Amino acid sequence: MPNFTDISLGAGLGRLQRRAAELRAEQEARKLTSTPAGTSDKSQTAAESANVAQTNEELQIAPVGDGEHVVQLGDCISSIAKASGHFWETIWNHAGNAELNAARRDPHVLFPGDRVTVPPLTPKYEPGQTETRHRFRRRGEPGVLRLVVKDADEPLANRPYVLKFDDHEVTGVTDSLGQIDQPLRPDARRATLIVGEGEEANEFELNLGHIHPIESISGVQARLTIWDTTSAA
């Protein structure tokens, strides 16, 4: 399962800032090394524009995998598993998804266009006497929303919260580190999280499964956007 994700009301960006700085530095380095000395201002500007466009294209990650299921925005291995009747580990650890597993590393952060191998269901047989009623229990496998909620790097610890998704509403309390570990439907697409009460309440709109891998520019941008969430009384 994935690690905890930070949601902040204006904290330092840490690792994400460094990643964004690395991308900018890589662009600048390409501009410095690819523009010949002695070129005119006009030709230099054209060369820089072309180089930035090339860098942006190269920094975008490409879809991986060769399965029949094409990942759409909002898909994750858990939602694909629920739709196909599998446990998520069955799909994630399938040999046909080895390339996907190695490239993405997190079964809940896929890239639109990735291709997932969904194996056929395998029948399971259990012995039982005829003319006798038997009860079988299907193992449920809910998804889990894991978040750390902070305000200016300070955890919103021991705060009541309300999580709304689909037609469900659940309540709880953040722990001493501001963490939330809440089961929810693996195919949930959107949720609303309200942390705190009254004038101190903060509301977050969550698009579940929409964040791209951090190796992509869009993935870095999305994580930076999460850190700039506004509060609502």
Image: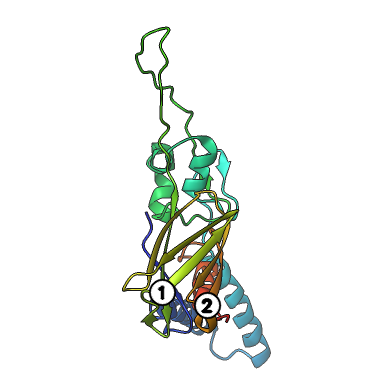
In the image: residue 136, left or right of residue 200: left
Q: CA distance from mark 2 to mark 1?
A: 11 Å
Residue 33 placed where, x, y %? 48, 81
- Between circles 2 and 1, the one closer to the viewer is 1
Secondary structure found at label 1: loop
The total of numbered circles placed on residues is 2
Q: Residue furthest left?
A: 176
- What's the amino acid at mark 2? Asn
The structure residue drawn at horizontal position 61% and vertical position 73%, both measured from the top left corner, is 53
Residue 22 vs 106, above or below: the answer is below
Quarter of the view holding residue 191: bottom right
- What's the amino acid at mark 1? Arg
Residue 45 placed where, x, y %? 64, 86
Camera-side residue of 22 and 53: 22
Q: Is residue 116 visible?
A: no
Secondary structure found at label 2: strand
The structure residue drawn at horizontal position 37% and vertical position 41%, both measured from the top left corner, is 93
Numbered label attached to residue 202: 2
Around disc 2, counting alpha carbons within 10 Å, would you say few (fewer than 14), some (14 to 19), or many (20 or more)? many
In the image: residue 126, left or right of residue 20: left
Numbered label attached to residue 159: 1
**N-terminal label among 2 and 1:** 1
